[in-house]
Amino acid sequence: MGELKKKKRVCRLQRERNRATICENYALMCLILIEHKHRVSLTNIVQNKSKYSGQLQNRKL
């Protein structure tokens, strides 16, 4: 009984970890696209985060 519960928990944690990785990859892809389009470095993007966050939210990829 306890084994099944443990397995389910591990599966759930794995799914959440996968989801987080997908989100990170997507965010990185967005940053790379901005970097490519606007010819700015990733460090500039991080420093001017608020300026770019609006662009990311408004754009549909």
Image (tube, grey):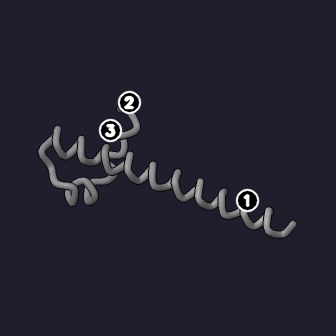
Kindly report the distance in space between the C-alpha atoms of the residues bearing marks 1 and 3.
Answer: 39 Å
Query: Which residue corresponds to mark 2?
Result: 60
Q: Residue 35 carries which label?
A: none
Q: Which of marks 3 and 2 is nearer the N terminus?
A: 3
SS for dot 1: helix
Label 1 neighbour load within 10 Å: few <14, some 14-19, many 20+? few
Q: Position of residue 51 (x, y in %)?
A: 29, 47
Q: Residue 55 carries which label?
A: 3
Q: Earlier in the sequence, mark 1 or mark 3?
A: 1
Q: Position of residue 24 (x, y in %)?
A: 41, 53
Badge number at residue 8? 1
Where is residue 44 shown, x and y percent of the image?
A: 20, 56
Tag 3–tag 2 contact (CB < 8 Å): no
Residue 22 placement, left or right of 10: left
Residue beneath the point at 40% across and 38% down: 57
**Dot 3, crowdedness within 10 Å: few (<14), some or many (≥20)?**
few
In the picture, measured across the screen, residue 39 lies left or right of residue 9, that is left
Q: In which quarter of the image is the N terminus?
A: bottom right
Residue 4 vs residue 45, the one in the foreground: 4
What is the three-letter code of the residue carrying label 2? Lys
The structure residue drawn at horizontal position 73% and vertical position 59%, both measured from the top left corner, is: 8
Nearer-N-terminus badge (1/2): 1
Amino acid, disc 3: Gln
- Determine the residue located farthest toward the bottom in the rendered image: 2
